[in-house]
Amino acid sequence: MPANIKDLFEVFPRVGKLEYISIRPARNEPVTSLTEVVVLENGGLAGDHYSGKNGKRDVTLLQAEHLPVIASFMGLPTLDPALTRRNLVVSGLNLLAFKGHTFQIGDEVQLEYTGECYPCSKMETALGDGGYNALRGHGGITARVVRGGVIRVGDEVKV
């Protein structure tokens, strides 16, 4: 057991899993769902319109566990992750706990937490009235690519 609070920031209960991958080929276009993608060092996901534009937002990630919460707020039975417009959906780990950490997806890719990913006004269109507020506090995180490679749905995610 860790001796102090600082040590607790380094303890994660288990390894996570990559559940979903998507790219947005062009601004204001629907996302494209993929089973694998090339992650470009200091560039983001190959084929994504954000790729190479902003090092603090190379990749966006959302917790799978938040999808039912957002759906509940919207009065929906389920929520398609494509509607959130995030690149990656991860289960089994609290993404906000990645603050100050570099983390790995699969065997090759390393990402660095750069901040929270706040909802945008597009959530009103994607989810309906109140979509923006439904996603507040559940928008996930942004990350910078430290080391590129290929990731696949089902890959492990670990700090």
Image (tube, rainbow, N blue to C red):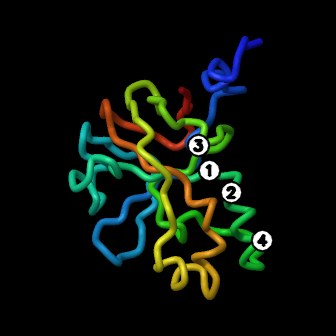
Q: Amino acid at mark 4?
A: Ser
> Quick one: label 2, few (<14), some, or many (20+) residues within 10 Å?
some
Identify the residue position indicated by label 2 in the image. 66
Q: Nearer the viewer, residue 8 or 41?
A: 8
User: Residue at the spot x=41%, y=44% of the render?
Assistant: 114
Circles 2, 3 touching at the beta carbon (< 8 Å): no
> Quick one: label 3, few (<14), some, or many (20+) residues within 10 Å?
some
Identify the residue position indicated by label 1 in the image. 63
- In the picture shown, does residue 8 fall above or below 124? above
Q: Amino acid at mark 1?
A: Gln
Q: Of callouts 2 and 3, which one flags the residue occurring earlier in the amino acid sequence?
A: 2
Identify the residue position indicated by label 3 in the image. 95
Q: Of callouts 3 and 4, which one flags the residue occurring earlier in the amino acid sequence?
A: 4
* In this view, the mark in front (3 or 1): 3
Mark carried by residue 72: 4
Residue 154 lies left or right of residue 13; in this view the side is left
Q: Position of residue 157 (x, y in %)?
A: 55, 33
Q: Nearer the viewer, residue 34 or 139?
A: 139
Q: Nearer the viewer, residue 145 or 32?
A: 145
Query: What element does badge 1 sit on?
Result: strand
- In the picture shown, does residue 64 fall above or below 2? below
Mark carried by residue 152: none
Circles 2, 1 touching at the beta carbon (< 8 Å): yes
Q: Position of residue 35 (x, y in %)?
A: 47, 49
Circles 3, 1 touching at the beta carbon (< 8 Å): yes
User: Residue at the spot x=74%, y=62% of the render?
Assistant: 68
Query: What element does badge 3 sit on?
Result: helix
